[in-house]
Image (cartoon, rainbow, N blue to C red):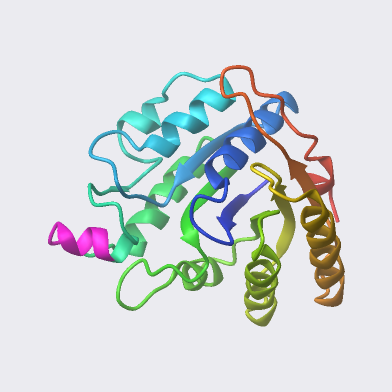
């Protein structure tokens, strides 16, 4: 397949769980896949998101995890990547992330690359995550949610992708936690309509509460099937 960026409409929106579940789905389809995290903040050892990916994939840690290829930058301070790096006297070099991805691609046909926060999170003082995606022409899977306010954040994200000519493969719609199913049902309709209006196919996969010990993997066929 290819390298795909998993980004979200906000932080703590469910990107890590969605990434791990999609990797599990691809493994079940006999597609060699590995996950990568661009930058992990709020962590001082192995990237926590990579650990969760492996758990959801039913996989032990890989040698690529141990060497740092699957998460080139880990910072202790829980903040935007640019700030977390500055707190440790560093600046993120996007080239280091890309080099790690190319190295992973030598042995894996598909790489799911999880971002940090949303599209407009700064990697450093000159590049945001959306810029990095555009530079490398990565397609995107966007993680949204049924929370109040998600329509605005999701449509703005779709608009940003469309304006930059970035492919949107589909949306993972996280319905957990969901306070109001009426809002959730309406929001998904609004999002689907705007995807079509923007020239994208309305490929949306819904994701509910996930048991991390025995995860039920959603059917991601509509996102990964050929156009």
State how many labels appear: 0
Q: Name the residue at 31% across, 70% down.
A: 124
The residue lying toward the viewer, choosing from 47 and 35, is: 47
Residue closer to the observer: 188 or 34: 188
* Foreground residue among 183 and 201: 183
Left or right of residue 89, residue 30 in this image: right
Residue 224 visible to the viewer: yes
Q: Position of residue 214 (x, y in %)?
A: 63, 17
Left or right of residue 60: residue 27: right
Across and down, in percent, residue 88 comes to 14, 56
Quarter of the image where one finds residue 70? top left
Identified at 56% across, 47% down, the residue is: 15
Direction left: furthest residue: 89
Quadrant occupied by the N terminus: top right
From the top left corner, tell me how far across and down residue 140 is, in percent.
64, 59
Placement of the C terminus among the 4 image quadrants: bottom right
Against 156, residue 72 (above or below) is above
The answer to whether residue 27 is left or right of residue 124 is right
Main secondary structure found in the magenta portion: helix
Task: Determine whether, in the image, residue 2 is placed left or right of residue 41.
Answer: right
State the residue lying farthest toward the bottom. 163
Q: Nearer the viewer, residue 175 or 222?
A: 175
Residue 109 in sight in this render: no
Residue 127 position, x and y percent, is 39, 74
Residue positioned 85% across, 76% down in the render: 197
Q: Is residue 142 magenta?
A: no
- Residue at (71% x, 31% y) in the render: 25
Whether the magenta-drawn stretch holds residue 89 is answered as yes
Q: Which residues are magenta?
A: 83-90
The image shows residue 158, relative to residue 53, as above or below, that is below
Q: Work out whether 64 lies above or below 135.
A: above
């Amino acid at each position: 397949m290819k390298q795909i960026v998993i980004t979200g409409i906000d932080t703590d929106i469910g990107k890590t769980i969605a990434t791990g579940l999609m990797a599990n789905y691809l493994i079940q389809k006999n597609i060699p896949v590995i996950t990568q995290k661009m930058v992990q903040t709020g962590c001082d050892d192995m990237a926590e998101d990579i650990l969760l990916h492996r758990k959801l994939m039913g996989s032990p840690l890989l040698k690529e995890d141990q060497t740092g290829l699957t998460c080139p930058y880990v910072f202790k301070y829980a903040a935007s990547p640019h700030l977390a790096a500055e707190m440790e006297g560093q600046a993120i070099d996007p080239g280091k992330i890309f080099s790690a991805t190319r190295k992973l691609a030598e042995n894996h046909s598909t790489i799911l690359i999880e971002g940090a926060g949303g599209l407009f999170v700064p990697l450093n003082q000159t590049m945001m995550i959306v810029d990095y995606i555009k530079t490398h022409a990565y397609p995107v899977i966007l993680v949204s949610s049924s929370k109040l306010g998600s329509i605005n954040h999701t449509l703005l994200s779709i608009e940003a992708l469309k304006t930059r000519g970035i492919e949107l493969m589909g949306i993972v719609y996280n319905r957990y936690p969901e306070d109001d199913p009426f809002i959730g049902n309406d929001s998904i309709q609004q999002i689907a309509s705007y995807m079509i209006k923007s020239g994208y196919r309305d490929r949306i996969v819904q994701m509910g509460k996930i048991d991390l010990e025995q995860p039920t993997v959603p059917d991601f066929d509509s996102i990964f099937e050929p156009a």
